[in-house]
Image (tube, grey):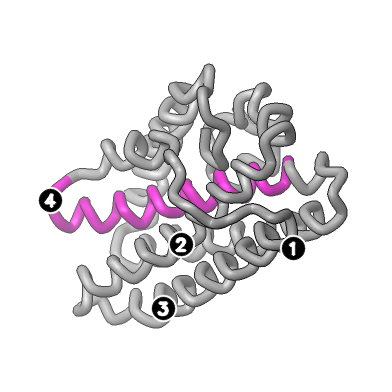
Amino acid sequence: MCGMFGRMLNLHAPSHAAWLPAALAAMDDVLLDHAHCEKKAASTAMSLLFRYPDHLELQRPLSELAREELAHFELVLRHLDRRGVRFKRQRPSAYAGRLMEAVRPQEPERLLDMLLCMSLIEARSCERMKLLSEALEDDELRSLYKGLLASEARHHTTYVDLARLYFDADVVRVRLEALAAHEASALEREWPATHVRMHT
């Protein structure tokens, strides 16, 4: 099980011990993947806006979240430029796809699962950024990840809070625990990793 930080993020298990040293040895790849992750997070928030236009309580929070994710995307692009790394296509990890396998197809269960899966992705990002912020020797990258911790944790909380607007708190709690166990399993299946990513 995770320590106190992981429990705050509703994570079922910590990252694989091999991830941090592998990430530190391949930071250009990790940073490029991070940029893609921020862009995908913005896209997912926008897709939820369009899929659920009658869910008025989703509209403003998800719009704000999407804008913040795009701001983070631009921030990471600046760090890629600083390191002389060109933004380009990259082979992603299978993590997100494996996590989304647990999303139930019928409504309203689909909405609940999508919100909670997004909350777990944000939580895992937060955990990984904390690891990087404590281990990186590059001052600017260390500052980048330290600065993003609060917003990633807030995004995790936002998705859980949105789920509680539409579903009973006990239903959310039980489903989040089940999805967190699935998330930990999906993450573990990434190892041994061929390509180091934010979510391998």
Q: Are marks 1 and 3 in contact (CB under 8 Å)?
A: no
Q: Which residue is the site of mark 4?
A: 106
Residue 144 percent coordinates (x, y): 74, 59
Q: CA distance from mark 4 to mark 2?
A: 27 Å
Where is mark 3, residue-wise? Answer: 63
Q: Identify which residue is drawn at 51% across, 59% down.
A: 38
- Type of residue at label 4? Gln
Three-letter code for the amino acid on which mark 1 is drawn? Gly
Q: CA distance from mark 3 to mark 4?
A: 24 Å
Q: Earlier in the sequence, mark 1 or mark 4?
A: 4
Label 4 environment density (alpha carbons within 10 Å; few <14, some 14–19, many ≥20) = few
Q: CA distance from mark 1 to mark 4?
A: 38 Å
The answer to which quarter of the image holds residue 149 is: bottom right
**Which label sits on residue 39?**
2
State the residue position of label 1: 147
Q: Which of these two is toward me, 62 or 196?
A: 196
Mark nearer the N terminus (3 vs 4): 3
Task: Describe the element under mark 4 as helix, strand or loop.
Answer: loop
- Earlier in the chain: of badge 4 and badge 2, it is 2
Other-residue count near label 1 (Cα within 10 Å), few / some / many at <14 / 14–19 / ≥20: some
In the displayed structure, 25 sits above or below 38; it is: above
